[in-house]
Image (cartoon, rainbow, N blue to C red):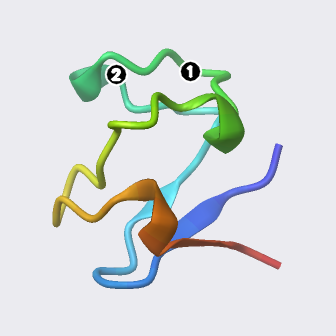
Amino acid sequence: MKKYVCDICDYVYDPAAGDPDNGVDPGTAFADLPEDWVCPLCGASKDDFTEMA
Protein backbone atom coordinates (compact mmCIF):
# COMPACT_ATOMS: atom_id res chain seq x y z
CA MET A 1 0.00 0.00 0.00
CA LYS A 2 1.17 3.48 -0.82
CA LYS A 3 2.17 6.07 1.75
CA TYR A 4 0.79 9.59 1.72
CA VAL A 5 2.46 12.78 2.97
CA CYS A 6 0.76 15.83 4.45
CA ASP A 7 1.45 18.87 2.26
CA ILE A 8 1.34 21.13 5.31
CA CYS A 9 3.54 19.46 7.95
CA ASP A 10 5.18 16.50 6.12
CA TYR A 11 3.54 13.84 8.34
CA VAL A 12 3.61 10.51 6.49
CA TYR A 13 0.57 8.25 6.71
CA ASP A 14 1.85 4.68 6.49
CA PRO A 15 -0.96 2.16 5.94
CA ALA A 16 1.14 -0.59 7.53
CA ALA A 17 1.18 1.37 10.80
CA GLY A 18 -2.26 2.98 10.55
CA ASP A 19 -3.09 5.68 13.11
CA PRO A 20 -4.03 3.69 16.23
CA ASP A 21 -4.08 6.79 18.45
CA ASN A 22 -7.00 8.01 16.34
CA GLY A 23 -8.84 4.71 15.86
CA VAL A 24 -7.29 3.67 12.53
CA ASP A 25 -6.09 0.07 12.56
CA PRO A 26 -2.80 -0.99 10.95
CA GLY A 27 -3.39 -2.16 7.39
CA THR A 28 -5.94 0.58 6.62
CA ALA A 29 -5.38 2.01 3.14
CA PHE A 30 -5.44 5.80 2.79
CA ALA A 31 -8.53 5.55 0.59
CA ASP A 32 -10.30 3.65 3.38
CA LEU A 33 -9.69 6.30 6.04
CA PRO A 34 -12.88 7.95 7.30
CA GLU A 35 -13.74 11.16 5.44
CA ASP A 36 -13.44 13.11 8.70
CA TRP A 37 -9.94 11.78 9.48
CA VAL A 38 -7.38 14.56 9.85
CA CYS A 39 -3.60 14.69 10.08
CA PRO A 40 -2.67 13.78 13.67
CA LEU A 41 0.06 16.44 13.74
CA CYS A 42 -1.52 19.53 12.18
CA GLY A 43 -5.23 18.73 11.67
CA ALA A 44 -5.13 18.97 7.86
CA SER A 45 -7.84 17.14 5.92
CA LYS A 46 -7.30 14.15 3.63
CA ASP A 47 -7.40 16.61 0.70
CA ASP A 48 -4.10 18.05 1.94
CA PHE A 49 -2.22 14.76 1.43
CA THR A 50 -0.24 13.69 -1.63
CA GLU A 51 0.66 10.14 -2.64
CA MET A 52 4.36 9.44 -2.22
CA ALA A 53 6.30 8.24 -5.24
Q: Secondary structure at mark 1?
A: loop
11 with respect to 5 (left or right): left
Q: Is the C-beta separation of discs 1 and 2 under 8 Å?
A: yes
Rendered location of residue 3, percent (x, y): 68, 57
Rendered location of residue 39, percent (x, y): 30, 55
Residue 38 position (above or below residue 25): below
Tell me which amino acid carries mark 1.
Pro
Residue 38 position (above or below residue 26): below
Q: Earlier in the sequence, mark 1 or mark 2?
A: 2
Q: Quadrant of the N terminus?
A: top right
Q: Residue at x 44, y 73 (%)?
A: 48
Q: Secondary structure at mark 2?
A: helix
The label shown at residue 20 is 2
Q: Residue at x 63, y 42 (%)?
A: 30
Q: Residue at x 34, y 59 (%)?
A: 45
Q: Is the residue marked by circle 2 packed among few (<14), some (14-19), or many (20+) residues within 10 Å?
A: few
| Residue, disc 1 | 26
Residue 13 position (above or below residue 20): below
Tell me which amino acid carries mark 2.
Pro
23 with respect to 49 (left or right): left
